[in-house]
Amino acid sequence: MLCHLRTAFTVITLTGTLLSNVAWADIVISGTRIVYRGAQKDVNVRLENKGSRPLLVQTWLDTGNDNTEPGAIKVPFNATPPVSRIDPKKGQTIKIMYTGSQTLPSDRESVFWFNVLEVPPKANKNENSAAQNTLQLAFRTRIKLFYRPQGLGDLAGEAPAKLTWRMKHEQGKSVVTVNNPTPYFVSFNSIELESTGKKYIVDGQMAAPLTETSFTLKTATTISSGKINYSFINDFGGIINATASLQ
């Protein structure tokens, strides 16, 4: 299996919004996220080889732990074909299908990660020793897959406006909490706390549905009021700026 070949290469992992700015990987995914609506039988993801050499590509899904080998992961999705060869300037369509092997919540979204590992060809024996000794890089790209149960509708774009933000101080740490009363995940590109003319970076990536999530500030502060400047990522991968008051 291809998963056993990963140790032969230096694997560089690319995730989320990095994709639009990265020129190293040859395989390009059509989009920066996947929304799988419950009424759909399957969804197609297009891969394109923008490079000048054929590549062996493995695809799989995981639940968030990027260190687990594909064969050890249990998710209710199949990605086919799991392994494919993509020639230069050619493409491959990957079909993702919900198998129902695990029951997912019907009142909120679930999130998974779609992985693409591209493995370069081995150096030709006829090439000089310098070429054969070149470090081989295998690029792994990960994007989120949101499973949206049938009945929720496509109202995810309204979720960010319904978030409420608060400031807490716990064990000497400054923590920003965000309550998400909606059934949708909200993915952040950036979060910043602004108060009395100063700005503080908040370390946070997603607000899970129907729950409260805590994010830490990279710099401790005693601030209890101010506003949150943030940007979120919509279903189409667009980045939208927004502002909210601390409550």
Image (cartoon, rainbow, N blue to C red):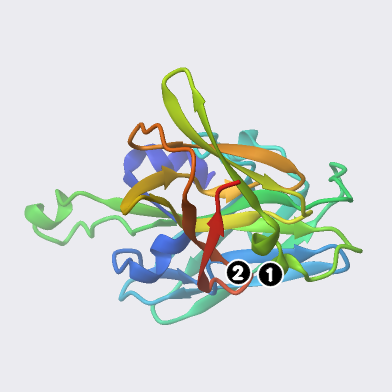
Does the residue at mark 2 contact the one at mark 1 (Cβ under 8 Å)? yes
User: Residue 31 sits in which quadrant?
Assistant: bottom right
Residue lying at the far top of the rendered structure? 171
Q: Position of residue 195 (x, y in %)?
A: 39, 49
207 to the left or right of 201: right
Q: What secondary structure is marked by label 2?
A: loop
- Name the foreground residue: 246 vs 113: 246
Q: To which residue does mark 2 refer?
A: 234
User: Percent x, y for residue 91?
Assistant: 51, 77
- Closer-to-camera residue (72/228): 228
Q: Residue at x 59, y 64 (%)?
A: 33
Q: Name the kind of residue labelled 1 in the image.
A: Gly
Kind of residue indicated by mark 2: Asn
Residue shown at 87%/49% (left/top)?
100
Left/right placement of residue 78 relative to residue 238 reads right
Identity of the residue drawn at 41% across and 20% down: 172
Label annotation for residue 157:
1
The answer to whether residue 82 is visible is no
Mark earlier in primary sequence (2, 1): 1
In the displayed structure, does residue 32 sit left or right of residue 79? left
Quadrant in which residue 81 is drawn: bottom right
Residue 151, x across and y down, in percent: 91, 64
User: Residue at (37%, 33%) from the top-left corner?
Assistant: 221
Q: How many marks?
A: 2
Secondary element at image label 1 = helix
Q: In the drawing, does residue 128 fall left or right of residue 160? A: left
Which image quadrant: the N terminus?
A: top right
Q: CA distance from mark 2 to mark 1?
A: 6 Å
Q: Position of residue 162 (x, y in %)?
A: 70, 58
